[in-house]
Amino acid sequence: MKRVAILPSTAGAAGDLSAGRDVLEPVLLQELSRMGRFELVPVTPDQLREWTGRGHWQTADQLPVEFFQKIREKTGCHAVFFSHLTYYHAYPPIAIGWRMALVDSDEPLIRWAVDELYDGGEEATAKAARLYFTKHLPSHPLADSSVVLASPRRFGQFVTGALVGTLPSR
């Protein structure tokens, strides 16, 4: 899989999930790009609506029969990436949950999937987040690694980095 269509992220109906999606979707795209495992082809809600009749889809939805064929024709992609924000708590302890899947558009077959909740209040998660911050995220000289546990965007970078880091190579 060299080219992957990145579908618009979805979120539950609760207002905090929609707000979380708005904050974290760009972070997800940034982390996917940083990994460099695939050529990314972001699909807008308008494009998806034109091609499939809806602007957002989840893997749990009953997809149209021609869904993957249409995405493949329009984007030239070999796979489709789905993401759904399942949990979002923006105040310490920050917690973020994602359900993601990479689906081969030729077969279609799920090649990779995760459904995880990261809770910054858990000691092991907090330690991993601080370690990620010191290794991967540029910081202000006066900032310390605890900032990752107070910033939804920074914690989101840790979470998405950890999750997409498990994606298979090309």
Image (cartoon, rainbow, N blue to C red):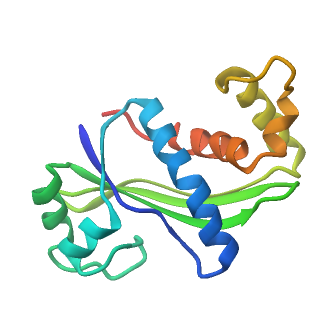
Q: Nearer the viewer, residue 118 or 85?
A: 85
Please tell me in which quadrant of the rendered image residue 155 appears.
top right
Is residue 81 found left or right of 87 in the rendered image? left
Residue name at image x 63 percent, y 41 percent = 157
Is residue 147 found left or right of 49 in the rendered image? right
Query: In this rendering, does residue 117 appear at all?
Result: yes
Query: In this rendering, does residue 166 appear at all?
Result: no
Q: Nearer the viewer, residue 145 or 110?
A: 145
Residue 105 is situated, as x and y percent measured from the top left of the image, at 21, 57
Q: Residue furthest left?
A: 73
Residue name at image x 30 percent, y 57 percent = 43
Residue 1 is situated, as x and y percent measured from the top left of the image, at 24, 41
State how many labels appear: 0
Residue name at image x 77 percent, y 35 percent = 128
Residue 27 is situated, as x and y percent measured from the top left of the image, at 55, 45
Name the quadrant of the C terminus.
top left
